[in-house]
Image (tube, helix red, strand yellow):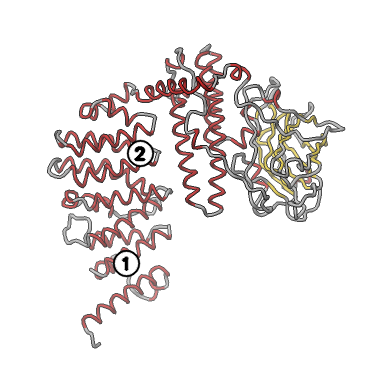
Amino acid sequence: MPRKAPFNVIFASSEDEKFRASELDEHGPTVKGWQSHRYCQFPQEIIFRLHYPITLTQVQILAHQYLIPRKLELWLGPEEHEETEDVSDLNFGYIGYITLSDNKKSSYKSRELKSISVPDCKPTAYVKLMLESNHENAHNKYNQVSLVAVQLLGESKTGLKELSPFDDLSFEMYVDKEVSNIIRQMETKKEEAVKAERFRYAGKLKSAMVALREVGERLGRYEVSKQQAIANEDYSRANRKKEQMDLLRSEAYATLNINDLLEEDGIMTKNDAAGNEILEASTPSEEADTPEVCPDNIPPPGVYQSPLSPLRYTSPPVRSTRSQSSVVQPIRTGSLRKKKQPRTSYDQYDDRIIPAAQRSINEEKAVVVHSAALKMNEREKKQAALPISVFGISLVEKFYSRQYSDKEEGVRTLESVLRNGGLEGNKIARGAVFLLHRALRDKVFSVYSMASSAVEYFFNSFVSSRVSVSEMSRSVEKILPELLSKSGDVTPRIHNTAVHTILSMAHAPELRKLNLIPVHITRPLTSSTHPRLALSRLEIAEQLILSIGISTDKNSGMTARVLAEFGASGLHHPAEAVRKVAERVLVLVYRVNPRMVRKQLPPDDDITRRNLLYRQLMREFDKIDLQAMHLLFPHF
């Protein structure tokens, strides 16, 4: 069976600085593709080196919307990899050519996808594409040519002449990476299920793959919109797109029961049981998929334009739904742009439900899926035995649900239980911490944010006079590492929420008496500590110094000695941002105890001051010493 052949571009006649030839090595919604240099000489050549020799059966080309070559020639190289640095030493054989449309009919707003059937030929390890001069148009100001993506399909051994729809270039370019990987896993599982005669399981996998394909295309469009917003520095819009992606992904995975269908923990008998089929792909967050408004004017070269008309997947094989050009001479010209296909297969089209009945059926399906999402398996029930005994299974099931709305409701209910009290303090504290720790690890931000607020209430209000010291210490040891991990997240809102929650815990009256938070924060850093985690701990320590102050209690974790050692350890971190904050911490400590800080640093001499970091730090110390001298001797 022909499969996608991995390759690397080893030569290109020219390339634009922003659109390198190496872009062709990858496929995805945000891939920019290759563009030739401005006013380049023709023909332009691109040589691909396959990872292993194949018998090439098909080449797929996705052209640019206006940087279009008139003609494209196909050449095949030697069968075995050759150890040569000069590509001119490789011998290529001419196969044929195709012509590309000038794209006037679409007003240069769509991209042409060519699927080229290669006649029987010898195995090859190298493929060369030769691009002739460009079609002239008002948008192509510099006479460039471009290829957005290239796909090589073939077989290493004799096999069936059948192409998997998931090796198609349209699938590679327009479907989210994570979703495409899951679909390929499902395809493998489906083949195994058919061999094992698990036909119900195979049918569920097939339905899920069709639904996931549509979800993946929507995620791909969101990703492109997010990247455009980032390029335009419209970060609020980029954040909205990220939230839409997270919500759509989590709801789709939960609705389609992805974890169960992949059977990562072994065969699941329920996959072979008769039951409701997978819901349509439009179930999760359909209303959130707002179409992007594309400008009428085409941006100048160098600005990446997202695809306006992504090719759609249908259940019939790809060969039967897309016209192809055969690489023989003379070649037939004309656009082979794929026609828009129905969103469902012909069988599904015949079984469509009239709109009047659709709403009630969807509501019934939603009830079935929602109830299934709340069920806990035996392993989860054993794991959550303590909170179940305290709060009951109905509340705990919400935290284990696959629906984010159930998790939000669970956090709200738990917080109301904490506010009402009435139960044994230590027992309810242990059960609540177990559930809050699980909610803090959730990938949906709204659940994580609500859990953080509940943690603040728990430590600031609930534990007072209800929970023993040992239980408070155990609760901090459970929650704090997760918050510290979140404080190192690259997403600003996740980082800020974690830092705010930790500082709130540090100021909680009961925890402040026990000095539990500062002791964990001010442990010395090592050079292997992740930069974002180190930076977060230093920033938290800086805020604690400003708000709580430096203590003389040896067990507080906020003494001048501990803070000086902590700041000095940050000075030796390889990340510059970490060293800058460590410098600020040392300056704050120096105002209180100069001797202790200087004890942690090299001697103040000319050799030490040659180091830029130490020189700046010593200058700050000199300023502080001068200010202290003026206070002692005003007339000095």
- The spot of residue 210 in percent (x, y) is 56, 25
Kindly state the secondary structure of the residue where label 2 is placed. Answer: helix
Residue, far left: 465
- The spot of residue 493 in percent (x, y) is 39, 49
What is the crowding at mark 1: few (fewer than 14 residues within 10 Å), some, or many (at least 20)?
Answer: some
**Residue drawn 24% across the image and 30% down it:** 387
**Residue drawn 32% across the image and 67% down it:** 601
* Pointer 1 with pointer 2, Cβ within 8 A: no
Image quarter where the N terminus lies is top right
| Depth order, front residue of 526/443 | 443
- Residue type, mark 2 in image: Val
Point out the tag, 1 or 2, that comes first from the N-terminus.
2
- Residue type, mark 1 in image: Leu
Of badges 1 and 2, the one in the foreground is: 2
| Depth order, front residue of 504/47 | 504
Q: Is residue 508 left or right of 150 when viewed as pictured?
A: left
Residue 250 falls in image quadrant: top left
Residue, far front: 356
Q: Tell me: residue 209, above or below residue 67.
A: above
- The spot of residue 592 in percent (x, y) is 23, 68
**In the image, which disc is placed on residue 601?**
1
Q: CA distance from mark 1 to mark 2?
A: 44 Å
Image quarter where the C terminus lies is bottom left
**Residue drawn 35% across the image and 65% down it:** 583
Q: Is residue 630 left or right of 14 when viewed as pictured?
A: left
**In the image, which disc is placed on residue 444?**
none
Kindly state the secondary structure of the residue where label 1 is placed. Answer: loop
What is the crowding at mark 2: few (fewer than 14 residues within 10 Å), some, or many (at least 20)?
Answer: many
**In the image, which disc is placed on residue 447?**
2
